[in-house]
Amino acid sequence: MLQDISNLCMNCMMDKGEEETCSACGFNNATENESGYIPLRTEIKERYIIGNVLDSNDEGVTYIGWDKENDCSVRVREFYPEKIASRDKDGVKLVVNTDNDLLFSQYLGEFINLARKLEECTDLNNIFKVTDVFEENGTAYHVTENVKTITLREFLLRNGGLLTWDQFKPLVSPVISALSILHSKGIIHGGISPETLHVGRDGIIRVTGFCVQSVRMENSDLPSQLYPGYAAIEQYGYDGKFGTWTDVYSITAVIFRVLVGNPPPEATERVSSDHMIIPAKIVETMPQNLLNTMAKGLAIMANDRIKSMDKLKSGLFSQNNGVVGSPTIAIQGIGKKTVSEDNPELIEDDLGEESNKKYVFIALGLTLLILLIVFFFIWKLIISPNLSANNDSSSKATTSSDITSSQTVSDDLPDGATTVVPQCIGKKLSEVLSDVETALTLKFVVIEKNYSNEYERNTIFYQSIEADTTVDEGTTIEIKISLGPEMIKVPVVRSMTLEDAKLTLVFAGFQLDNIIIMQKDDNTVEDGKVVGTDIDSGMTVSADSTIIIYQCNNPNGTNHGGGNSGGNNNNGGGTNNSSSNSSNVSSDNSSSKASSEESNSSNSSTEATTSTESGEG
């Protein structure tokens, strides 16, 4: 238990001791929050101590906080719509602006209602769990657990810019399932993007950024916060209601970004010119059902789009897993994929321009399509069951961004179906879920994460139902995951690039969020390379330890093969602890901050990502 609250760092909520500047994160506790935000160290509900601002938008602001009752750090979200309310002279209470009382009350009620619904989702691992909801200071708050995470965007930038489908599907599958559960409770997100999906060191992607609906719509009473490329057309005020299909568009756009390296064009641009470019080498590795489902999930108009997360998941994880194979394959329903004249490595999708120009005929087209499908099945099943050659010509759709799969997969599991529990112990959860049948027929819930000297990091060491047991499809398997050994050895990182050093420490077992970057003048190491760490290499420390990487910040620095200088340890891996207090050391404000936006050119996304990361610090 932390005995002295005054020693808390107001940025990371760790014990900083008597020092003004936190050695763990470099935050100076003499700093104050910007005007308009609750001052640091303010106590609300006689329980929560308010810290530094984590993020804000036109609905409210999120602070890091300390829960005195449970002695742990938390996240405190305050309803604070600056357009219709302002801070009182005491710096804490909110005062509603003139003539906005009714509007404020309406949105306050939505904020509380959303928080209450999220509070009920205690078994959902893919969100930050809401632990408290209360009203105070003329507004409302909700408190969530504080899990160390980084955004999916940052995660991708640190992993080459993109992932393969085999790598990403076990990560995104639980997210889609979680969104389905949230939809069943009437919660529609409206802002799903790589910025609001956070990746934890436990391998779980958590959905963040829940807001009142008006923030996710243009032309509303509150300024909107939309994510270009991920926001659906109905969020921009075009025809179409806000619904579950809105989140379908966003999560499909996220999948597109992860696999291709760039987000789809903004929905408003796609209305007039609907082209998407995918590198041929990426298309050739994609299962046909994945391409089909992505096109349906990214249909511009809501009426043409997949409507539910369950149907999206069924399409993504269907058994039709044959890869496309040819860079000039014709895809039904959206025209042909042709090799681009400007770059033969790129494939250009003609995503239904003809239908985009004639949206007034969409309803008529859909009606005719339904009649054609009905006629086709009557012909195939009743009149001429032996004539199957007409399948392709009878089932083509002409709706925008729609691809019809050559195989039909049931959206629902058959009643009374059973399956066999796989062997999970000793495997990573991603390995278990890489089997499509397992991912579709069983649910896995992580109930505990503990250090273990017997099992490697991120491997399962317990499953609630033994392997080879026959169970009903849909059964939940509780699992426990190893965090690896509790004590780890500090590796040598001297003379490495900053990124190589961070990766080396992560692979050794350090938490990414516990790695701090600081700069140091050193004539024995090439400028930009790593001088060492504040903990000598070879030492054994806790996996939860904070470790500082010292990066050379000397334009005249040269690489002398890792020679010894000042407080450097002879093994080249660390620096003497006393050097951390040198006046030549300055904190990097954010070792994990992405230095640029994603490249707009998909075939150079990996190269652009590498260059931005290497320039960090």
Image: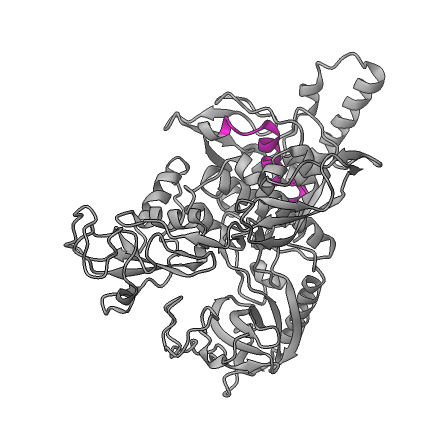
Whole-percent x and y of residue 614?
Answer: 31, 48
Residue at figure coordinates x 63%, y 36% from the top left: 316
Whole-percent x and y of residue 5?
Answer: 50, 80
Q: What is the quadrant of the N terminus in the image? A: bottom right
Q: Where is 324 relative to 247, above or below?
A: above
Residue positioned most to the left: 556
Q: Where is 35 relative to 162, above or below?
A: below
Q: Is residue 496 visible?
A: yes
Q: Is residue 272 left or right of residue 478?
A: left
**Which image quadrant for residue 586?**
bottom left
**Which image quadrant for residue 304?**
top right
Residue at figure coordinates x 54%, y 30% from the top left: 286
Residue at figure coordinates x 37%, y 28% from the top left: 343
Looking at the image, which is closer to me, 559 or 380?
Answer: 559
Whether residue 304 is in magenta: the answer is yes
Whole-percent x and y of residue 396?
Answer: 66, 25
Q: What is the quadrant of the C terminus in the image? A: bottom left
Read off the magenta span: 283-306
